[in-house]
Every structure is written in structure tokens, then in C-alpha cells.
Image (cartoon, rainbow, N blue to C red):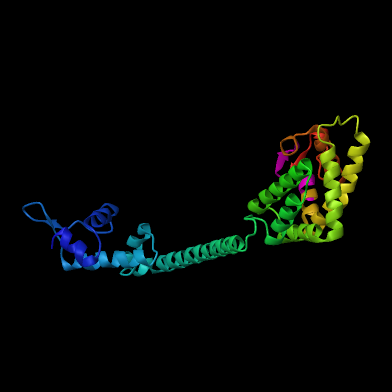
């Protein structure tokens, strides 16, 4: 039979068959005097076996060894190991797809409920939205937006456990804690564009006030101890504090805060870095 007949019988295309020839999965058939390939039943059987394995998820690079192992006892052990490895790969892909499906379903549910689309857990995302939309002062609102963005970066990076977000959500949804947090952010926003040397006392006071709330979140999630250990071993990744907080006075507040939490490398001083 001609290559077109073989392709039709196998439910594929001549181009695919030629590709299998190039990969060595199909032997070249004999050629007629006119130069055309002449395929036989054995070629069709081989082609169907190749396609059967490919549909099962076997990479084309492994097909030849599997077909050889079927008639070679010495390769049987290798075949078993290859199949186990392929199954493990498929299972890992299945788990990845299941997780992706769950995230997409959550996004769809969030959209249908009219909630903000965010990588943050729904309760925390909604709490930040309430803070931002409920704040009349543009400067304070910008601080809330920047804080939300920072939390989204943490969520996307996967560098914090769920407890980290749960603790923050509890603080932002508890009326008393929320009022205190809003008050602190207003104080933090108020130092913007100020000379750090002229408001040194207020900088220390704001850092001290922020410490209690931040320490609660980091301690309950276990991040404080982990980041402190990283600081001692030098294993932590760092991001320049100047990039995170460009204003000099606000950066001074954050530097004091990190120092109080034991998260400021001694070699960096006022130009410290924050754990990433």
C-alpha cells in the first residue's frame, strides 16, 4: 500500500508517518521501481502500536524502547521503570491540573459574587477592599493600596503559609483591631515627606506601635522565627527597603520596625533590607 493508504488505515497523515520515519519509529519500507514506498501489513501494525502508545501518553522518545522491550527480556526491567516513571509524571500533571481547576473555579465564584479578583484569600481581599474604599484621606488610601499590593506579592510567591493570611484577615475584620490599624496607618501616612531628623521621636513611636500588630501576624504564622533564623544564617532573600518604601521618613519607620523585630541585618543599618 502507498503512504496515503497507510495513513488512512491508521487514522493519521502521511506527514506524521514521515516524522516517525525520521525518529526511527518506523523502518523505511522497500521502494518500487517508480520510487514509491510500498508498505505492508507489518508496517501498519507497527504504526498502530506507535500511535497506541503515544495516545497513552508515552513520549515518542520512549516508544522505541518500549516496543523493543516487548520482545526483549533483558529490557523488561527497564520497561517497568519507564512505565512507573511515566505514571508518576501523569499523576503529577493531574494534581497540577486539579489545583489549576480549583483556582479557576474560585476566580469564577469570586467574579460571580462581585468580589475583588485577587490572589489573596477571599476574606483578606475583601477586608483590604473595605479599608481602601472606606478611607476618605487619599494619602492613607494609598498606603492601604500599597499594603494590599505587597500582600498580593507574598501570596503569588507562595513564600508564606495560610496562617499568615488568616491572622491578618482576623486583625482587619475585628472592629477594635481594625480601628487601631487604621489609626496606625494614618500616623504612618502623616510622616510622608517629613524630615526624619526633625520627627525622630514620632518615627520611633510609630515603629513601636506597629510592632505589636506585625509581631502578632508573624508569630502566629511562624514566619517571625523563620525570618529571624534566616537573618542569622544569611539564608534569606532580600529586597532593598528603598525600593519598597521610597520616602525617607516612612523608610526610617520601617527600618526601626524591622530592627525591633530582629529582621534587620546589622551590616545594613539605616539602609536595611526586608525579607522577601
Give x and y (percent) for residue 243.
Answer: 71, 36
- Does the rendering let one see residue 153? yes
Identify whether 64 is placed above or below 237. Answer: below
Task: Tell whether 218 sits left or right of 205.
Answer: left
The quadrant of the picture occupied by the N terminus is bottom left
Span of residues in magenta:
229-241
Residue at the spot x=68%, y=61% of the render? Answer: 122
Question: Image check: 169 left or right of 28?
Answer: right
Please name whichever residue, 207 or 82, is drawn nearer the observer in this view of the structure: 207
Number of numbered discs overlaid on the protein picture: 0
> Quick one: quadrant of the C terminus?
top right
Residue 276 seen in render: no
> Residue 161 in magenta?
no
Q: Residue at x 33, y 69 (%)?
A: 70
Outermost residue on the right side: it is 201
Q: Quadrant of residue 246?
A: top right
Between residue 274 and residue 177, name the one nearer to us.
177
Relative vertical location of residue 156 with respect to residue 195 in this rendering, above or below? below
Residue 224 placed where, x, y %? 80, 52
Quarter occupied by residue 269: top right
Q: Position of residue 115 (x, y in %)?
A: 65, 59
Say above or below: 124 vs 241.
Answer: below
Q: Is residue 233 magenta?
A: yes
Amino acid at each position: 500500500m502507498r503512504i496515503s493508504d497507510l495513513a488512512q488505515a491508521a487514522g493519521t497523515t502521511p506527514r506524521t508517518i514521515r516524522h516517525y520515519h525520521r525518529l526511527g519509529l518506523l523502518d523505511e519500507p522497500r521502494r518500487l521501481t517508480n520510487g514509491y514506498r510500498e508498505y505492508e501489513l507489518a508496517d501498519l501494525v507497527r504504526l498502530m502500536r506507535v500511535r497506541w502508545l503515544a495516545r497513552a501518553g508515552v513520549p515518542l522518545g520512549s516508544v522505541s524502547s518500549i516496543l523493543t522491550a516487548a520482545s526483549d527480556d533483558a529490557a523488561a526491567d527497564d520497561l517497568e521503570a519507564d512505565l512507573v516513571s511515566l505514571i508518576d509524571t501523569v499523576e503529577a500533571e493531574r494534581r497540577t491540573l486539579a489545583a489549576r481547576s480549583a483556582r479557576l473555579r474560585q476566580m469564577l465564584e469570586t467574579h460571580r459574587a462581585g468580589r475583588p479578583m485577587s490572589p489573596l484569600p477571599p476574606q483578606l481581599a475583601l477586608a483590604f477592599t473595605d479599608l481602601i474604599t472606606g478611607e476618605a484621606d487619599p494619602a492613607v488610601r494609598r498606603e492601604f493600596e500599597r499594603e494590599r499590593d505587597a500582600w498580593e506579592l507574598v501570596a503569588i510567591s507562595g513564600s508564606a503559609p495560610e496562617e499568615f493570611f488568616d491572622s491578618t484577615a482576623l486583625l482587619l475584620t475585628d472592629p477594635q483591631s481594625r480601628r487601631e490599624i487604621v489609626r496606625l496607618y494614618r500616623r504612618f501616612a502623616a510622616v510622608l515627606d517629613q524630615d526624619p531628623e526633625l520627627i525622630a521621636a514620632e518615627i520611633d513611636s510609630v515603629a513601636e506601635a506597629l510592632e505589636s500588630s506585625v509581631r502578632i501576624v508573624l508569630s502566629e504564622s511562624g514566619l517571625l522565627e523563620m525570618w529571624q533564623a534566616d537573618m542569622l544564617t544569611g539564608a534569606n532573600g532580600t529586597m532593598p527597603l528603598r525600593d519598597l518604601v521610597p520616602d525617607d521618613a516612612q523608610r526610617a519607620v520601617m527600618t526601626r520596625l524591622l530592627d525591633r523585630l530582629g529582621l534587620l541585618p546589622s551590616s545594613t543599618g539605616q539602609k536595611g533590607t526586608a525579607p522577601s
